[in-house]
Image (spheres, rainbow, N blue to C red):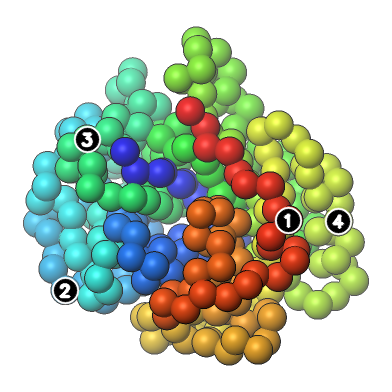
Amino acid sequence: MPVVISFVSTKGGVGKTTVAANLGGLLAAFGMKVLEIDADVQPSLSRFFPVHYRSPRGLTAVVTSGGNPSGDCISRTIFSNLDLIYSDTADAGLQSWLNRREDRLMIMRRAMRSPVLESYDVVLIDTQGAVGELQKSAAMAADYMVSPVKPDALSAGEFASGTVAMLDELNRLSDFGASFRSGDLFVLINAHERTVNARVLTQTLRAQFGAGPRVRVLDTVVPSAAAYAGAAMSRIPVHEFDRRRSFPRSAWNVMHALAWELFPALTGRYADGSHGVPSHEVRNRAPLERVA
Ligand SMILES: Nc1ncnc2c1ncn2[C@@H]1O[C@H](COP(=O)(O)OP(=O)(O)OP(=O)(O)O)[C@@H](O)[C@H]1O
Ligand SMILES: [Mg+2]
């Protein structure tokens, strides 16, 4: 069974698609078999990387099959090991379809167990920055969730009142038993500017959620950098766009740190096949526990 990570936030524009796409690109370069699912009705992830095989169907078929997708839902990007289920609904039709289904929260989770997905090591699900049934279904499918937060007051406030509230609601609904629990949520500080404000907000988030049992702030911080938009324009993973090894905040180093934090077994391995001793800070991290 693949490890499933859903990218969620009730706020838009915080970097879900950017991080999901680039993490997928890096993990695929490591040789992991990666499937990216665009579960946003605005299909940004679907267009992020060039596709060399476009399947006849996409997300709609996955959802409306009740989570029993057929193999013809999977497209292939030009990068080896990196496949895609594209978003193909231009409107809220899928959300209202889900609204009518009693098992709506479990549909994406069921899809993750489908034989069609069996060969993948990792599935990354991108969602829309709003509250909706599709987002909740994606959250329930996840072994864990990553929620990028920009360190500004609005984003941090929205994270606490919106995203954490959604997680709490799901877990209340899931009180039936452990197997019905939504995954743990990891906050990723994204687009961090080198300002006092950003530093203070990051510290506040760490103090507020640092040690929580269900919500944790990742050690890796993604700086604000032009490389993220640049790579998206060039349609290549950002670790290929900004490959500076000697600059600690380069996209190459930051994306590796993020991959190592999420997948500790990869620590010290680089996408170009080389190995390196990770920094002290990285080595001392406690591995993330995967939700059973
Ligand atoms: N670390 C970063 N540094 C600079 N710009 C960034 C960074 N991460 C994301 N961006 C930019 O921020 C914008 C929003 O990012 P993105 O589309 O990934 O957010 P999103 O959470 O997926 O938004 P939505 O909720 O609308 O789907 C994009 O223009 C992206 O290039
Ligand atoms: Mg997005």
Single out the mark in the foreground, 3 or 2.
Answer: 3
Amino acid at dot 2: His
Bin the neighbour count of mark 3 within 10 Å (Cα to Cα): few under 14, some 14-19, many 20 and up. some
Whichever of labels 4 and 2 marks the residue nearer the N terminus, that label is 2
Front residue of this view, candidates 142 and 276: 276
Measured Cα–Cα span from mark 4 to mark 2 = 43 Å
Find numbered disc 3 in the image and state the secondary structure of the residue it sits on.
loop
Quarter of the figure with residue 233 = bottom left
Identify the disc placed on residue 52. 2
Residue at the image position 75 percent from the left and 35 percent from the top: 212
Whichever of labels 4 and 1 marks the residue nearer the N terminus, that label is 4
Whichever of labels 3 and 1 marks the residue nearer the N terminus, that label is 3
Amino acid at dot 3: Ser
Which residue in the structure is indicated by mark 3?
114
Whichever of labels 3 and 2 marks the residue nearer the N terminus, that label is 2
Identify the disc placed on residue 203. 4
Amino acid at dot 4: Gln
Q: Looking at the image, is 56 positioned above or below residue 255?
A: above
State whether residue 155 appears in this view.
no
Which residue in the structure is indicated by mark 1?
284
Residue at the image position 75 percent from the left and 66 percent from the top: 280
Q: Position of residue 166 (x, y in %)?
A: 59, 33
Bin the neighbour count of mark 4 within 10 Å (Cα to Cα): few under 14, some 14-19, many 20 and up. some
**From the Cβ of disc 4, is ligand 1 less than 8 Å away?**
no
Find numbered disc 4 in the image and state the secondary structure of the residue it sits on.
helix
Q: Position of residue 175 (x, y in %)?
A: 55, 13
Callout 4–callout 2 Cβ contact below 8 Å? no
Q: Position of residue 156 (x, y in %)?
A: 75, 52
